[in-house]
Amino acid sequence: EPEVTQTPSHQVTQMGQEVILRCVPISNHLYFYWYRQILGQKVEFLVSFYNNEISEKSEIFDDQFSVERPDGSNFTLKIRSTKLEDSAMYFCASSEEGRPTQTYEQYFGPGTRLTVT
Amino acid sequence: QKEVEQDPGPLSVPEGAIVSLNCTYSNSAFQYFMWYRQYSRKGPELLMYTYSSGNKEDGRFTAQVDKSSKYISLFIRDSQPSDSATYLCAKGTGGSYIPTFGRGTSLIVHP
């Protein structure tokens, strides 16, 4: 069964450093997303991406964040200068369609745990 | 005002029990509701979605929406230890396909 994969599973970085989180969405999917989940808190939407551009973003997704689809398979989230409060689980997701339909579903990856020290 | 609220639990039940998981929401600008299951160290997995009030059944799972009281429920029949996970409710609007999640309820089904 196709699945979303993410690397690394755990990333430890020092405050102020840049990190890149990587995702490989399901191959025929067109819409890509990043979410984060701070320990013990809700899953929060960061950004969605379609046709090589951002289609929607939340207030969390400020200038420190960027996304890219550098090739036909990878989807990345970059945090330019990490802060302690960026420590969280980051989930990538992908879907065939962007709008709710009878078969609407976002498939989530297993997540990357980011620890900023 | 928080949009989607869930009791975090944990909710502990014996195998075979009927489980009731609940969620309340505050914003009426919605069109659909979803339940996700999240196992430890995994991403959320969509279990069910529904667009309207009433019940929707899928195997051992039933989702119920009561728009008048802004209440969403997930019932699990004949619960199994493999159902032990965190269950997240989420809602979305027709104008945005991005779900707004609740914090999740931790369910433990013990043999």
Image: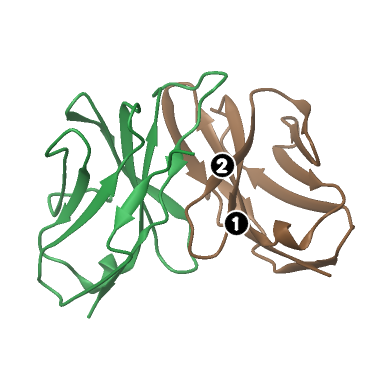
Chain colours: A green, B brown
Mark 2 and mark 1 residues within 8 Å of each other at the beta carbon:
no
- Label 1 is placed on what type of residue? Gly
**Is residue B3 visible from the viewing direction of this image?**
no
Q: In whole angstroms, how far apart are the C-alphas of marks 2 and 1? A: 9 Å
Q: Secondary structure at mark 1?
A: loop
In the image, residue A103 above or below residue B25: above
Where is residue B57 shown, x and y percent of the image?
78, 31
* Residue at horizontal 80 percent and vertical 45 percent from the top: B75
Q: Name the residue beneath numbered marker 1.
A: B104
Helix, strand or loop for disc 2: strand
Q: Residues within 10 Å of mark 1 (few under 14, many from 20)?
A: many
Q: Nearer the viewer, residue A57 or B74?
A: B74
Image coordinates of residue B19 in percent, x first then y, are 82, 54
What subunit carries mark 2?
A: B
| Mark 2 neighbour density, 10 Å: few (under 14) some (14–19) many (20 or more) | many
Which quadrant, please, contains the C terminus of chain A? bottom left
Q: Is residue A77 above or below residue B8?
A: above
Q: Is residue A68 above or below residue A43?
A: above
Give whichever of B68, A44 is nearer the camera. Answer: A44
Residue B97 position, x and y percent, is 43, 28
Q: Which residue is mark 2?
A: B90
Whether B47 is drawn above or below A111: the answer is above
Q: Amino acid at mark 2?
A: Ala
Depth check, front residue: A8 or B31: A8
Q: Quadrant of residue A26?
A: top left
| Label tally | 2
Which chain letter matches label 1? B
- Tell me whether marks 2 and 1 sit on the same chain: yes
Q: Is residue B19 left or right of residue A105?
A: right
Sequence-first tag of 2 and 1: 2
